Image (spheres, rainbow, N blue to C red):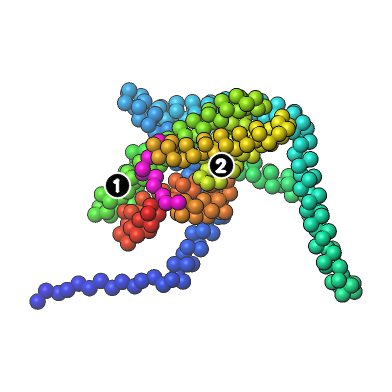
Amino acid sequence: MPLEETKVRTPSSAPARIIAGGIVIAFCYFASSVLITLLVAVLLTYFLDPVVNWMENIRIPRALGSLIVVLVTIALVVFLAWSLIERVDQFGADWPNYERPLRAAADVVQKKMALFEARVSEIETGNEAAGAGTRTVEVQEPHALRNAIFARLSTLYSFLLAATFIPFLVFFMLAAKRQVWHATMQLFPATQRTDVKQTLSDVTQVLRSYVVGTALVGLILVIASWLFFMGIGLDFPFLTALVSGLFNLIPYLGVILSWMPPLMIGLKQFHSVGPFIGIFIMLMVFHLIAANLLVPALVGWRVRLNALALTVALLFWGWLWGAMGLILAIPITAVIKVVCDHVEGWQPVGRWLSA
């Protein structure tokens, strides 16, 4: 009589899953600089890998091709940064002219708030007599300027640390692509390597489609905004178009954020409501075209997330990592969906993310 094998499964309890999830979130928060650096390097690697493959096809060694691509990319970034610094310096020199209308608008809002507070204080006058005998303890706040300097130094240190490591990471990932792929396969049993290979292949297609497509959409938005701002005579059209166009890439919130740069620049030049209405309408049209035509055509059907999952991802990663979280939320969620689609028991989560 054949012996029957019985598998004993001990389902993990809900508290254990909650604790594990909390540990993962805490790790993502405290190791944010390391994880963001790695993720940005991975996205750049997927963006530059087709160029390295092309150079390898024309008999250039992969290590040499990777070095050339990384050096050319660094030179291009430095050139663009230097061009932007000149425009930012010019904008900084003209900042007092833009500060006056902004200060006037802020003063109007401040007066409204002061009037509201005065009316509220009239209601609370009856409670002041009751608390006349109470003792007030003043707590001196730390110096604001010192806190601002330390905050800027901390941000600058994190940025310089990431900028230093990213080129090396990209080079090593490009040059040792096959070795890393083979070593990754060795981490799994032989019976699972086919599924793992398919999963990694799908992740590669998703990330490459997202990075290349998003770069093209961003370039189109920046050029279209640049031409529009030049057409209406807005000051600093390229710098304004660069910031506004990149903001416009952010789903949902991007269209509102893209209004801020031309609004701030236009307060000095325009003294009627008409130009601002035109700017808002045109940027809204750019956003709708990008979201409904360019992104589906260039990013492709592989990065397919429903509106609710996308909104939750933006809220969560934006809360966890700030501005970089908003940028990385979509590729992270897309990769999670691909992994869920290939792991038994997680397919319902993958279907929910794309429903």
Image spot of residue 218 (x, y percent): 50, 34
**Nearer to the camera, 272 or 188:** 272
Q: Which residues are magenta?
A: 298-307
Work out whether residue 132 can be spotted. yes
Q: x, y percentage for residue 25? A: 51, 58
Disc 2 target residue = 255
Position of 349 with respect to 73 (left or right) is left
Q: Residue at x 73, y 46 (%)?
A: 148
Secondary structure mostly taken by the magenta-highlighted segment of the chain: loop
Residue at 65% of width from left, 27% of height from top? 234
Please indicate whether residue 42 sits to the left or right of residue 145 in the image. left
Q: Pick whichever, 93 or 276, lies toward us.
A: 276
Q: Which residue is mark 1?
A: 197
- Residue at the image point whose x is 30% and y is 59% from the top: 344
Please state, as top left, top right, bottom left or bottom right, where the C terminus lies in the image.
bottom left
Say what amino acid the circle numbered 1 marks: Lys
- Residue that extends furthest to the top in the rendered view of this protein: 58
What quarter of the picture does the N terminus occupy? bottom left
